[in-house]
Amino acid sequence: MNILYDEAVDGALGKVDARDLFAELRAAMPDLQILHREEDLHPYECDGLSAYRTMPLLVVLPERIEQVEAILRICHARRVPVVARGAGTGLSGGALPLAQGVLLVMARFNRILEVNPRARFARVQPGVRNLAISQAAAPHGLYYAPDPSSQIACSIGGNVAENAGGVHCLKYGLTVHNVIGIEILTMEGERLKLGADALDSPGFDLLALFMGSEGMLGIVTEVTVKLLPKPRVARVLMASFDSVDSAGRAVADIIGEGIIPGGLEMMDKLAIQAAEDFIHAGYPVEAEAILLCELDGVEADVAEDIERVRAVLGRAGATAVSLARDEAERVRFWAGRKNAFPAVGRMSPDYYCMDGTIPRKHLPTVLRGTAALSERYGLRVANVFHAGDGNMHPLILFDANQPGELERAEELGGRILELCVAVGGTITGEHGVGREKINQMCVQFNADELSFFHAVKAAFDAEGLLNPGKNIPTLRRCAENGRMRVHQGEMPFPDLERF
């Protein structure tokens, strides 16, 4: 299973004496909350990928930056690994603890420090919820654009760690495009500030490097985000299709027409039925696929784009196109999409959420390939994804109580990701690699590239103590798993052409 640690990583960590570490932390910070009893550690044994669980050695919940500095310095001196955790909503095992490590929970850093409507930015601590930023900016007619489906719970520090997106990232960008500065602590407890208040900062773009680094380079202590004016008008079209192929082609046709929607989302029949049963959003359950296309801006431009998109959808074979009648229906359409994950959870004892990205033109091919793999492995797959930028979220339905089904779901998920790479895509769009996709890193990147990634990490964390064993596989792991890198679009997927 993907969850197994590299032996090389295990060996490097060594054995940690929990009592001695607890005593040193308590002596240095008498007011620091430290969890050490088994019953207190259980809630922290996994993130949103709950199939994988590890009990941490200790959990620390600091409230001040000085406490975080001290924790890191003590752990660095003792060579104790540290895994940072925010709200724990991640879906790739990125916040999975280490049995011989400290879990550093940043949830209590939850203050909005400043909202500056004139300069259009907000300074926040990493534990602030994504949605709370927009709520704080709303009185000024502003909002924070990236909106993951988990935005009601996920924290901005975690968004930085995974470079989160959301349904509106097609037009407004991912976290990397909406953060202008961060403050971090290195593993040695040194404070660094990356980015600047200006449009650019001198030197290397370390801010962009840090986005999506999954807690491997430093601990985020403050984030400065861009705020945007709320669009004057936002309207949503819902188009039904009698095949996923037609819906996939329509996505490329809309972008090819020079239209950049605020959001362009696709759901297949299984996901439609689940969301409609759960939310009653008004989705056509008889459709094989639907597209949700949001157009925003000023009234005249939106009205013109609606007619252009209607025409494109008609030519692409849409069987029906409806426009949300009012703001309440627009919100309901999006509620169905944003609640698709929990909705699918009502259809099966367990599901495994994948995250890969492909060129838009290959949507029909990859959807056909996913359907064929679903049949081959005997597991249903519901497809929900950010169609506009090709970020797919296949949901693999299985029952962990049935022997072998979790392993089969893992293998199916890996094959879907390899299919994404085969058509020129990548193994993640916004969920990160974590533990979940570490084997597929061996497929996407060659030995030289992986060595370079390790060198970048070593520049920030020479001892390899921050979130070790995640994201970047060792070359030994790749060799032992018999993985091979894709070369010029060719890979061990012999039946790709028939899709």
Image: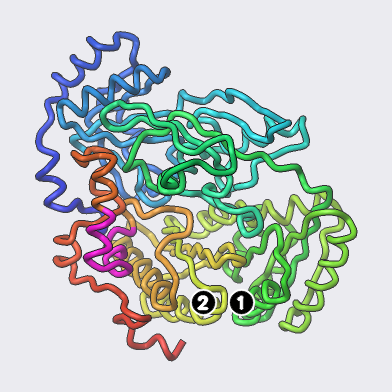
* Near-viewer residue (242 or 448): 448
Q: Which mark is residue 367?
A: 2
**Residue 450 image point, x, y percent:** 25, 60
**Residue 149 image point, x, y percent:** 58, 49
The image quarter in which residue 21 lies: top left
- Asked if residue 301 is positioned above or below residue 258 in the image, the reply reads above
Instruction: Identify residue type, mark 1.
Output: Gly
Part of the protein shown in magenta: 437-453
The image quarter in which residue 289 lies: bottom right
Q: Main secondary structure of the magenta part?
A: helix
Q: Residue at x 38, y 66 (%)?
A: 413
Q: Which mark is residue 265?
A: none
Q: Residue at x 29, y 19 (%)?
A: 70
* Near-viewer residue (217 or 23): 217
* Colour scheme: rainbow
Instruction: Identify residue type, mark 2.
Output: Leu
- Asked if residue 76 is positioned above or below residue 246 in the image, the reply reads above
Q: Residue at x 21, y 53 (%)?
A: 4
